[in-house]
Image: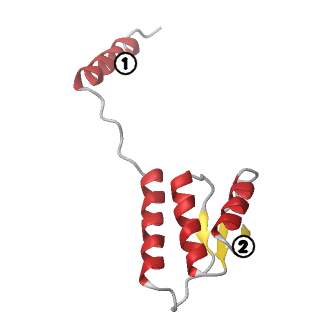
Amino acid sequence: MLDVVGSTPQSLSKRIDFVASRTDAPILLDGVSADVRIKTLEYVVQSGIKSPIIYNSLMPEYKGEELEKIKEAFVQQLLGMYHQRIAYPQNKVVELESRRGAGSGTGA
């Protein structure tokens, strides 16, 4: 786990890009202000970084906008991890099952 800190959205985004390109370890997002953290979180969601990004801390002082952005990012992560199975056309399922049945009855 790596703690990445930045004082501007640009510096924090560049540092996260650098770290994410070199490791699969979870990255702690740590900005000096709400604006820095929010803009960097937006960047992370839009850029599609695959490394797990973890908000370094949640404080009671965080305002609604920041908490909403965290929620949105979390939902995006979940949607990327858990998706619906691809529905196979019924005729393909029947064809595959018949092939499997035909192949198992040969016995040798």
Q: Please state, as top left, top right, bottom left or bottom right, where the N terminus lies in the image.
A: bottom right
The residue that mark 2 highlights is: 5
The tag earlier along the polypeptide, 1 or 2, is: 2
Q: Which residue is mark 1?
A: 100
Instruction: Please report the residue visible at 42 percent of the width from the left and 62 percent of the height from the top.
Output: 75
The percent position of residue 68, horizontal first and vertical second, equals 42, 74
Residue depicted at 60% across the width and 52% down the height: 50
How far across and how far down the image is residue 96, in percent? 33, 20
| Percent x, y of residue 66 | 48, 78
Q: Say which mark, if any, is on residue 32.
A: none
Find the distance from the CA under tag 1 to the CA under tag 2. 55 Å
Three-letter amino acid code of the residue under disc 2:
Val
Q: Amino acid at mark 1?
A: Arg
Q: Quadrant of residue 76?
A: bottom left
Q: Is residue 81 left or right of residue 88?
A: right
**Residue 103, position as x, y percentages in the image:** 39, 12
Task: Bin the neighbour count of mark 1 within 10 Å (Cα to Cα): few under 14, some 14-19, many 20 and up.
Answer: few
